[in-house]
Amino acid sequence: MTDRTNKKPGLKIVRYFNAPKEVVFEAFANAEALAEWWGPAGMPLTVKSFDFTPGGKFHYKMDGNGQTMWGMFRYVTITRPELVEFISSFSDEEGNVCKSPFPMDFPLEIFNELTLTDKGGRTTLTLQGHPINATPEQETTYASIHANMQEGFKGTFDQLERYLELRFKLQQQLKTDNKARVTTYLNFNGNTEEAFKFYRSVFKTEFAGKGIQRFSDVPAHDGQPPLSEADKKLILHVELPILGGHLLMATDAPESMGFKITPGNNMHICLEPESREEADRIFDELSVDGIIEMPMQDMFFGSYYGAFADKFGINWMVNYIHRD
């Protein structure tokens, strides 16, 4: 049993995200999300097993730079949406704790405390870690590479920041009034522009709203990971009326930005009610016995937003934007 009352000095990382803590927490609580941002850049992650409960495990594989590494979290305490305590380690393919693949005497297990606090829709993430069941030599090794670990976690949390920004900020609709409407929201792996020019030729309509918006149109902010020139040209948002005035909307969600598009997760029915109260009613009733991806909440990009798959496996978004 781990004694958490006698913590030794260890690593401490503080990071700020322009998203509510519920949003940040869900990025840790979902296997699909972790597969898109956890780990070093350039090492795609494959989830072997995931059980986000006290006593459960997150077992994963990372491939890149000519090597394969296995890792594991064992969850100790989970208090949604504020606290996750877990023991991290390297592992083998079967999920047994094993030594680091690096040529150093690194501790076998690290106890981690992840806390999230929210102020005005902005989240402070604090991650503190220290070795457990380690030899004095292993503790010395751990202390000697704090700077390297700080840099490594910076890269990982840069990926989390991009994941949060692209996953949720892109849901903002270019709506100019509060009239209820239903739209279809699509995601593409980098070929949104090609697809929508094709749809435009079929339906013989023109792009609505502000036309084609690209990622280069998003104002940069402090701490934002830089986009490649290729990614800047991708589609941030586009709208196209089709039959009966129905709108198709879409964004690019390429793997270069940490997304993984698979058939079934790239299409949502987006409901835009006339009021906040109606948004809550629809969400609560339609999501019964379903899987909630994001509970209804005020988002940092101006929406009151939630997302879920209903009990039949259909993906829905509920999005209310108040316009003065």
Image (spheres, rainbow, N blue to C red):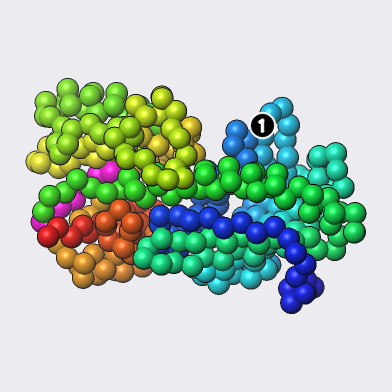
Residue positioned 31% across, 69% down in the render: 284
Q: Secondary structure at mark 1?
A: strand
Query: On the rendered structure, is 143 left or right of 105?
Result: left
Instruction: Assign the C terminus to one quadrant of the image.
Output: bottom left
Residue positioned 19% across, 51% down in the render: 182
Residue sitting nearer the eye, 219 or 39: 219
Residue 232 forms part of the magenta stretch: no
Instruction: Assign the N terminus to one quadrant of the image.
Output: bottom right
Q: Up-down: is 119 above or below 244?
A: below
Q: Position of residue 181 (x, y in %)?
A: 15, 52
- Start and end of the magenta stretch? 178-186
Q: Up-down: is 313 above or below 225?
A: below
Residue positioned 61% across, 60% down in the render: 127
Mark 1 = which residue?
64
Q: Position of residue 164 (x, y in %)?
A: 43, 49
Mainly helix, strand or loop, the magenta region?
A: strand
Please identify the quarter of the rendering in which residue 79 is found. bottom right
